[in-house]
Amino acid sequence: MNPKIEKLEKEIEKTKTKIAEMQAKLHKLEEQKTELENTDYVAVARSFKLTPQQLADFLKSQQAAPSETVLPQEKEDVHEA
C-alpha cells in the first residue's frame, strides 16, 4: 500500500482515539456540572424551608405561570408588612 495512505490511516485512527477520549472526558465533566447544579438547587430549596409538598406545588405553579407566582415565604412577608 502507498506509504502516504498508511500514514494517513494511522493519523485517522490516532485522531479517532483522541476524539473518543475527549468525548468521554466531556461526558464526565457534564455529569460533574449537573451534580453540582443539583446540589445548588437542593440548597436553595432547603433555604426556603418548604415542605416537599410546598416545593412541588411551587414548581408546578412556576410551570403554569412563571412570572405571576410568588414564593410561599414571600407571600407571608407581604401579609406581615
Image (tube, grey):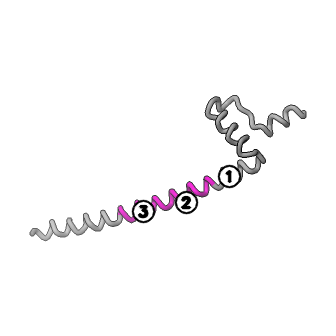
Q: Which residue is mark 3?
A: 24
Q: Is residue 6 left or right of residue 25?
A: left
Q: Which residue is mark 2?
A: 32
Q: Amino acid at mark 3?
A: Ala
Image position, residue 5 (x, y; %)? 15, 65
Near mark 1 (Cα within 10 A), the count class, few <14, some 14-19 or many ≥20, is few
* Picture quarter with the C terminus: top right
Image position, residue 77 (x, y; %)? 85, 37
**Residue sitting at 70 percent across and 29 percent down?**
68
**Residue sitting at 16 percent across and 69 percent down?**
6
Closer mark to the observer between disc 3 and disc 1? 1
Closer mark to the observer between disc 2 and disc 1? 1
The disc, 2 or 3, on the residue closer to the chain's N-terminal end is 3
Secondary structure under the numbered disc 3 in the rendered image: helix
**Quarter where residue 70 is shown:** top right
**Quarter where residue 62 is shown:** top right
Query: Does 50 appear above or below 15?
Result: above
Magenta run includes residue 42: no
Q: Is residue 11 left or right of residue 51?
A: left
User: Magenta region, mostly helix, strand or loop?
Assistant: helix
Near mark 2 (Cα within 10 A), the count class, few <14, some 14-19 or many ≥20, is few
Image position, residue 26 (x, y; %)? 45, 59
Q: Amino acid at mark 2?
A: Gln
The residue range painted magenta reads 19-38
Q: Is residue 4 left or right of residue 73?
A: left
**Residue sitting at 62 percent across and 30 percent down?**
64
Q: Which residue is mark 1?
A: 42
* Picture quarter with the N terminus: bottom left
Secondary structure under the numbered disc 1 in the rendered image: helix
Magenta run includes residue 23: yes
Image position, residue 50 (x, y; %)? 76, 45
